[in-house]
Image: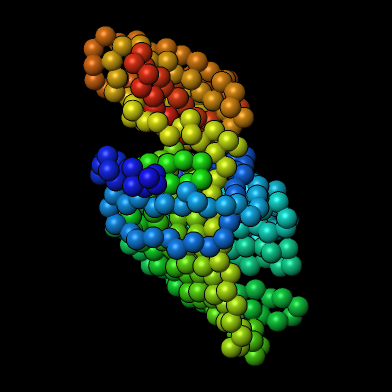
Amino acid sequence: MRIASLLALFGFAAAQAQFTLENPEHVPVPGLMFTVNLGPYVAPGAGGANQVWDFSSMAATGVDTLFFVDPASTPSGADFTSSTVALFDGDQDYSYFQATATEFLLNGNDDGNYAFPMSDPSKYWPFPCNFNDTWSDVLGGSVIVQAQTVTRAGTVTGIADGYGTLLLPFGPVDDVLRVVVDEDYQDAVSIITAIHDVQTHYYFKRFLPFPVFQITNRTTNVNGSITTLQTAQWVDSAAVGVLERWSAAIDAQLIPNPATGSTTLTFDARGDVDVSVVDLAGRVVLTERSTSLSPGPRSYTLDISALSKGTYTVRLIDRKGGTGARKLVVN
């Protein structure tokens, strides 16, 4: 019997919870690195509540490493001063993103030949973003390439259209929110017009700032000549230890976050709770123990003054084996 059938038989999908795509939990920051498996295009499946998206039979055709870096450190950083992070594919392509309190934006890209900063960025999703939320925005800009002005104009629309369980080759991933982003725009220069239609399905997991899985369908029409590029990719769980972060029996909050010097950890538990701070390499850099005999919410101040700037995971484990995790950004 297939995994999807087993999950449906035991009512697993019905137990899934909705979560909110939010800043800073789902914002990549400089210093993050993800290994992803590359595969052929696959139909994304239906939207809706309590879905089971079965991609367990996917076979990787390649592997790539994605680096999130400081935009100022890139060759075209001066053209993207409002960006908060750049995605580098290890070759020569950079994509520049900006996270604000209310939205996550694509500011433009650099393909190694020329940089294209957009005066009207592409709004990928709002913060916060919940199931059934929709949005739309204009995108565009212009750049001079070899004395020719290239003009970009179009729209981006999006919807958080489903949540449920994602079945990947290494196993099931529960508590997933799917976000669909459609970019329709054209690049025009002289007598040449390229019309682009890009649809990407992003599957997000709580605690992870990068999609667990994504499917992209890109169609380009250049003066009547049409090309299609369809791809899929999913994270290599062993590379970032994501499996260890997927249990969240203890719901926790960190305020402030990002933080400097100290931050307050709030959670609901009873008895002793071990608190540890883990860096991106998986090293435990701080350990504490919080003790309380009474059930209910409690607050605990973490002294992070000795930690270097960067991204960490705060993990909690209680006496009964319940766990929780939160991303922490130290400024």
Q: Is residue 274 visible?
A: yes
Q: Quadrant of the C terminus?
A: top right
Left or right: 100 with respect to 88?
left
The quadrant holding residue 31 is top right
Residue 17 lies, with reference to residue 44, above or below; the image says above
Q: Nearer the viewer, residue 295 or 85?
A: 295
Which residue is at a point 57% across and 20% down the rendered structure image?
285
Residue 32 lies, with reference to residue 45, above or below; the image says above
How many numbered markers are drawn? 0
The figure's colour scheme reads rainbow
Q: Nearer the viewer, residue 197 or 246?
A: 246
Q: Nearer the viewer, residue 42 or 279?
A: 42
Which residue is at a point 39% across and 24% down the rendered structure image?
323
Q: Position of residue 37 (x, y in %)?
A: 60, 49
Residue 69 lies, with reference to residue 232, above or below; the image says above
Q: Is residue 19 visible?
A: no
The quadrant holding residue 3 is top left
Which residue is at a point 48% across and 20% down the rendered structure image?
276
Residue 44 lies, with reference to residue 14, above or below; the image says below
Q: Position of residue 56 (x, y in %)?
A: 47, 48
Left or right: 272 with respect to 37?
left
Which residue is at a point 39% across and 60% down the rendered structure image?
45
Residue placed furthest toward the bottom: 191
Q: Nearer the viewer, residue 269 or 162?
A: 162
Q: Position of residue 60 (x, y in %)?
A: 60, 52
The quadrant holding residue 283 is top right
Q: Quadrant of the N terminus?
A: top left
Q: Position of residue 234 (x, y in %)?
A: 54, 49
